[in-house]
């Protein structure tokens, strides 16, 4: 259906253009250039290879749909115009770059490429980085030959970004003696059978590694959850110059390691199977052979699959390959490969001709479970269908002329519309397929939302240049809605927008199949979501996520929120089948079906002997419209609600319909806020601004229509005559009590007005500004103003109360503000202790405590800071907890139903037991964060083990989604466990922790590291961060032998205020240390038994910091051995063994206090100790100008903080001109002194370090 639909749009001159063609001249000169997708919130496509390019890029902003030129800083390092090169996106140290390699600026027939260098462009700074000379980038390796038609893939090897460059063509003039022997093709160029790696950070090449020769091929990393990278090479031409139908896979890490053992055979002709089974292997498939392909093939990784777009060479016989094997091929497989590689009688020349993309097709390779065994090669059914449809769309759109076949205008579909500029009409069979200039496929952030719930989508584009310019993008998520059918022009009138994708109307018979049978990824219409109505025995409505996501704000939010409906693929609505069907019909098409629009017409042309299904539904159109009005209001479809109100006003001549209309009008008398998202704006970068503009201009009309409708309904139902009044009175049992009471009240008012009474005083007064009648705009305003302004706005009038109130009470900074809402609550101050307050609940109530005001605001509370936050925190005592607990038990629902976070922070940390009663009282299933923040990590708010048992058991039962948890059990607390009257211990707290599988952060005392509890937390699957504080007394830790897979996700460890021997015990647990990338140690070494300073320094270096070798991934270290700032002399840790350990860690951020590195600061060896450090803070490291120059030589250093001493500043030693230091800071309380007359000179010399 979509191919047919796209064809009609191409022939419709009034359709909306997908891309603005007035900028197409920017890429009209692109010839075999590169297109690179730069990821981000708004995907952009960077193009290089257009005519006239010097240092500027041509960029396509997918969301704004416009080409533009990005001006870069003019530089001689820009690569210049070229073709047949590669452009690869990568990121390094948080910045984005594009690397351009190879290519040629000469004629396509000249195979002498002059470009062997790698040019790197900084996207953010719009700057081309200096190109290192060949003597530096190729030092110690064989000379790199220029090349074109190669592949360059970004791979990460040992935490270093590399380009994996495979194959290509190069000239025999630059051939060197020791590279793998190439094959001459047509005496013009040579095919290079090699793999090289280029380190993007060090800007250096490696030696070549032999792989089978390829050019004009494609390379892609195989989706895998393992650590071994697999690079798959598909398509292209082999060393004979013929089309290749064999695919091979390179083990990237094994190939990289093989560089250490160069083969002595490199000076001789290399066997064809050299390296096979060691670092590369042939790939075979039992179902679909991969090739041979005409022209280029395009590979895109997407999820656990690889999508292939290519034109299959139909002239060559297709043979099924053998099953996949990474080992050596069998003799039978080797023979078949040898036959396919038989050299032809005439060697073909490398093809520089652009092949036609009219016959492109698509496949998808799926690697089951991300396994690296490659044992399964099959077409993923749904992805394959999408690819075939995309290819068919491209073929017909690229060859079809603009022929007008229908005068009827189609509404835009859920996939982007396509437009071809008008051309001279001609019969379709007589048109010769045009040649495509280029084709590109990649992953973009489309904003649609796919079946997996992500916003990433595949984009396929073809650029056509045959006297007319056309850019045709195809989103594969939209093509997944394909429906089979005729594509003849005569059948075009039978398709009205997307209505053909909906299931047919239910005929009233109970379905005999299960609901899941309506979903199919192989049969049209490829539905992937079910909507169940309230009608008994009615079948579910099989619909499509993509259309609902892109056309309805309600379903957009539903699918993006992670609710159960997204996971199960099913949703239930309260409306009946007819109303649910009509709502989906409106979302798909923007109109209502004929049996609702014109129900009388369905009967006028109906024969007396037959009654169609539509006629049966038309007989109850009035009741369906009433139910549809309620559905439109609930699903945020104001345009539909306005349209239904207009239809209902035409039905106000049927007295029996009055109760239904009154009920619908009463239940929908609220403001409308959202509408269908127009397809032309679904991917706009300025969607919010455009939406606000539309709201201001046109969203007021539904409010006026609603008022007009309510006035008409009130007049009809209250003054419509005896029949209407009788129908309303008879419907008392059917209507809700509130709806019936509102009708009675309105009828009384109408009677009073009829008798000359005044209108209700509430209608008088100053009219509000119309902008405040749009709740979404009011909500947007409240999100930008202060909380106090929201409070004043909420007190303005009743109609403006609800939305600002939600912002005021989202974060309650001080629980006394919440408790004061309870009737009879009083605050008592102690005159003898001004800082002591006591809040008594129900003190002034003579009867039952009133919670009415509390309930009004309770649902808005998201964050509760019990004692306030920061310096404003203040402790208070609470009396009357029984009233709160009784209220929660009585209502059987949480007091704060939407509470997300409860935080206890006070100046005094002796109130640990209060945490238990606050959590027990205000526990809610929505709670995800429970924290007790100590004012000092030496004395956290302790609770007894029994209190911990009670609190954690309560959390485990009521908060299954808890993410962060803080509690500090201790046996040293002065509180007695029998103070918790009424609570019984059910499980130890560590047993209850097992039922919190989503916990990502745990803050606790050292008691959690005892044997039983340590076994529990080591098995928590999502625990990322562990913070350990002292338990008040020394704990002898004897950690048990943990399983091998303990702490599977732990990456951050914080140890604060512990005894030094406790710290050693924790750091000695390999399962804790092995996966860390961040480690914080803050404790006093003065607690050691030995008093000698040299012994303490030896203990720090040999016992403490030597354990860092257990964390090979450590990237951030925070060491503070003097947290109280009382030690006058910092410890010297500049030991040789410790520096060797530092040099082997990938440290990028280092912070140290209470220590210094001694004589190491005066040497030039720091760049080998900390080669990757970007931020270095050493509070107690003395730094003279000489020391500063040594630290400034760290190759990656951006920020440096030392104890700088600037007195008698002499001339600073010369440092490298490319030192990356950005900022220099002196530690607080340091000895940075400078005479006023030397200030200018000193600042200039210090500034030299950060140039």
Image (spheres, grey):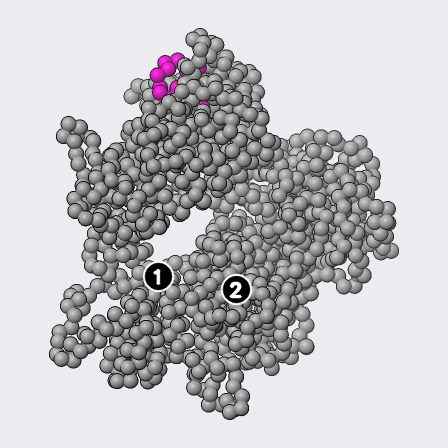
The x, y position of residue 76, in whole percent, is 55, 43
Q: Is residue 379 left or right of residue 1198?
A: right
Work out whether residue 1045 or residue 170 is closer to the camera in this orientation and state it. Answer: 1045
Q: Quadrant of residue 250?
A: top right
Q: Give the SS element for disc 2.
A: strand
Q: Quadrant of residue 362?
A: bottom right
The x, y position of residue 780, in whole percent, is 32, 55
Check residue 55 for magenta coloring.
no
**Mark pair 1, 2: CA separation:** 32 Å
Q: Is residue 1217 above or below residue 24?
A: above
**The C terminus, quarter of image:** top left
If you read the primary sequence from the N terminus, does the residue marked by circle 1 or circle 2 appear first?
2
Work out whether residue 715 or residue 284 is closer to the camera in this orientation and state it. Answer: 715
Q: Residue at x 38, y 65 (%)?
A: 634
Residue receiving disc 2:
530
Magenta span dominant secondary structure: loop
Q: Callout 1: few (<14), some (14-19), or many (20+) C-alpha neighbours within 10 Å? A: some
Q: Is residue 239 left or right of residue 509?
A: right
Q: Which residues are magenta?
A: 1116-1131
Q: Give the SS element for disc 1.
A: helix
């Amino acid at each position: 259906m979509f191919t047919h639909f796209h064809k009609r749009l191409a022939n419709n001159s009034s359709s909306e253009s997908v891309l603005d063609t007035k900028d197409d001249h920017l890429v009209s000169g692109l010839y075999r250039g590169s297109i690179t997708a730069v990821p981000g919130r708004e995907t952009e496509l960077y193009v290089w290879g257009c005519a006239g390019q010097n240092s500027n890029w041509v960029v396509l902003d997918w969301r704004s749909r416009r080409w533009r030129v990005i001006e870069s800083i003019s530089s001689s390092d820009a690569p210049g115009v070229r073709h047949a090169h590669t452009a690869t996106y990568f990121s390094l140290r948080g910045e984005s770059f594009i690397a351009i390699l190879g290519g040629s600026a000469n004629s396509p027939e000249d195979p002498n490429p002059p470009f062997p260098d790698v040019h790197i462009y900084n996207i953010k700074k719009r700057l081309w980085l200096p190109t290192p000379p060949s003597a530096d980038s190729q030092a110690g390796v064989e000379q790199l030959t220029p090349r074109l038609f190669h592949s360059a893939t970004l791979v990460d090897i040992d935490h270093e970004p590399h380009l994996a460059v495979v194959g290509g063509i190069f000239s025999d003039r630059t051939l060197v003696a020791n590279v793998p022997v190439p094959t001459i093709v047509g005496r013009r160029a040579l095919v290079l059978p090699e793999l090289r790696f280029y380190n993007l950070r060090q800007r250096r090449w490696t030696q070549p590694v032999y792989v089978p020769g390829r050019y004009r091929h494609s390379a892609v990393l195989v989706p895998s959850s393992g650590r071994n990278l697999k690079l798959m090479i598909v398509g292209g031409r082999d060393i004979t110059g013929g089309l290749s139908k064999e695919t091979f896979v390179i083990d990237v890490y094994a190939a990289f390691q093989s560089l250490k053992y160069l083969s002595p055979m490199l000076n001789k002709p290399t066997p064809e199977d050299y390296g096979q089974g060691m670092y590369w292997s042939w790939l075979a498939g039992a179902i679909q052979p991969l090739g041979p392909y005409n022209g280029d093939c395009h590979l895109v990784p997407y999820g656990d699959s690889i999508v292939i777009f290519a034109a299959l060479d139909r002239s060559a016989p297709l043979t099924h390959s053998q099953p996949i094997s990474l080992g050596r091929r069998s003799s039978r497989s080797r023979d078949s490969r040898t036959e396919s590689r038989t050299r032809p009688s005439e060697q073909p020349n490398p093809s520089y001709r652009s092949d036609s993309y009219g016959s492109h097709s698509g496949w998808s390779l799926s690697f089951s479970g991300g396994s690296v065994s490659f044992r399964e090669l099959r077409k993923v059914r749904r992805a394959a269908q999408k690819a075939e449809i995309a290819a068919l769309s491209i073929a017909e759109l690229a060859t079809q002329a603009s022929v007008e076949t229908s005068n009827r205008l189609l509404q835009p579909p859920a996939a982007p519309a396509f437009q071809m500029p008008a051309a001279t009409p001609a019969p379709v069979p007589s048109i010769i397929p045009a040649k495509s200039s280029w084709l590109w496929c990649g992953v973009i952030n489309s904003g649609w939302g796919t079946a997996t719930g992500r916003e990433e989508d595949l984009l396929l584009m073809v650029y056509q240049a045959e006297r007319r310019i056309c850019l045709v993008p195809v989103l594969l998520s939209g093509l997944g809605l394909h429906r089979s059918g005729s594509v003849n022009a005569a059948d075009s009138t039978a398709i009205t927008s997307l209505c053909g994708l909906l299931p047919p109307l239910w005929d009233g018979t109970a379905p005999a199949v299960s609901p899941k049978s309506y979903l199919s990824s192989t049969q049209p219409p490829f539905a992937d979501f079910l909507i169940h109505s309230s009608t008994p025995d009615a079948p579910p409505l099989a619909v499509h996520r993509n259309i609902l996501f892109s056309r309805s704000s309600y379903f957009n939010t539903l699918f993006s929120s992670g609710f159960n409906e997204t996971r199960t693929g099913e949703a239930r609505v309260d409306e009946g089948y007819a109303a649910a069907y009509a709502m989906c019909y409106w979302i798909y098409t923007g109109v209502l079906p004929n049996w609702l629009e014109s129900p009388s017409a369905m009967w006028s042309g109906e024969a007396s002997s037959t009654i169609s299904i539509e006629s049966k539904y038309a007989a109850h159109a009035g009741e369906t419209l009433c139910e549809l009005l309620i559905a439109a209001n609930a699903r945020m479809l104001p345009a539909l609600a306005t349209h239904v109100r207009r239809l209902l006003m035409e039905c106000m001549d049927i007295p029996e319909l009055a109760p239904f209309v009154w009920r619908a009008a009463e239940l929908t008398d609220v403001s409308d806020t959202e509408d269908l998202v127009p397809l032309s704006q679904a991917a706009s970068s300025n969607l919010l601004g455009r939406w606000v503009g539309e709201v201001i201009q046109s969203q007021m009309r539904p409010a006026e229509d609603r008022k007009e409708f309510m006035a008409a309904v009130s007049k009809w139902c209250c003054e419509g005559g005896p029949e209407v009044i009788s129908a309303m009175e008879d419907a008392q049992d059917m209507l809700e009590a509130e709806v019936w009471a509102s009708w009675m009240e309105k009828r009384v008012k109408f009677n009073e007005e009829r008798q000359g009474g005044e209108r209700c005083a509430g209608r008088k007064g100053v009219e509000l500004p119309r902008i405040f009648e749009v709740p979404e705009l009011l909500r947007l305003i409240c999100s930008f103003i202060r909380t106090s302004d929201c409070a004043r706005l909420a007190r303005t009038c009743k109609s403006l109360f609800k939305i600002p109130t939600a912002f005021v009470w989202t974060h309650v900074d001080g629980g006394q503000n919440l408790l004061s809402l309870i009737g009879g609550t009083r605050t008592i101050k102690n005159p003898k202790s001004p800082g002591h307050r006591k809040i008594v609940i129900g003190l002034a109530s003579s009867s039952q405590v009133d919670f009415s005001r509390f309930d009004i605001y309770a649902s808005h509370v998201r964050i509760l800071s019990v004692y306030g936050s920061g310096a404003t925190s203040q402790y208070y005592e609470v009396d009357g907890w029984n009233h709160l607990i009784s209220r929660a038990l009585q209502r059987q629902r949480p007091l704060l139903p939407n509470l997300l976070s409860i935080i206890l922070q006070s100046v005094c940390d002796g109130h640990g037991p209060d945490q238990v009663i606050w959590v027990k009282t205000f526990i809610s299933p929505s709670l995800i964060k429970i924290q007790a923040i100590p004012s000092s990590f030496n004395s956290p708010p302790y609770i007894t083990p029994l209190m911990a048992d009670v609190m954690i058991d309560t959390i485990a039962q009521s908060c299954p989604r808890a993410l962060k948890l803080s509690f500090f059990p201790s046996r040293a607390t002065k509180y007695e466990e029998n103070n918790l009257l009424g609570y019984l211990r059910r499980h130890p707290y560590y047993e209850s922790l097992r039922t919190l599988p989503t916990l990502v952060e745990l803050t606790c005392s050292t008691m959690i590291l005892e044997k039983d509890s340590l076994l529990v937390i080591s098995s928590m699957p999502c625990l990322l961060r562990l913070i350990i504080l002292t338990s008040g007394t020394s704990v002898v830790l004897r950690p048990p032998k943990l399983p091998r897979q303990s702490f599977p996700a732990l990456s951050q460890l914080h140890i604060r205020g512990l005894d030094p021997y406790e710290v050693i015990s924790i750091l000695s647990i390999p399962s804790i240390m092995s996966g860390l990338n961040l480690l914080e140690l803050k404790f006093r070494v003065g607690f050691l038994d030995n008093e000698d300073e040299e012994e303490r320094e030896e203990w720090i270096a040999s016992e403490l910091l030597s354990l860092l070798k257990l964390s090979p991934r450590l990237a951030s270290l925070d060491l503070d051995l003097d947290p109280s700032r009382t030690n006058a002399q910092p410890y010297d840790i500049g030991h040789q063994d410790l520096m060797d350990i530092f040099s082997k860690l990938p440290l990028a951020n280092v912070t140290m206090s209470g220590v210094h590195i001694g004589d190491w600061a005066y040497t030039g060896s720091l760049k080998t100790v900390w080669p990757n450090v970007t931020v270095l803070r050493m509070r107690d490291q003395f730094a003279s100008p000489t020391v500063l120059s040594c630290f400034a030589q760290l190759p990656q250093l951006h920020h440096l903080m030392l104890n700088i001493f600037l007195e008698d500043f002499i001339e600073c030693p010369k440092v490298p001109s490319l030192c990356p230091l950005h900022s220099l800071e002196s530690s607080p309380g340091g000895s940075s002194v400078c005479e006023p007359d030397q200030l200018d000179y000193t600042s200039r010399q210090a500034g030299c370090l950060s140039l």
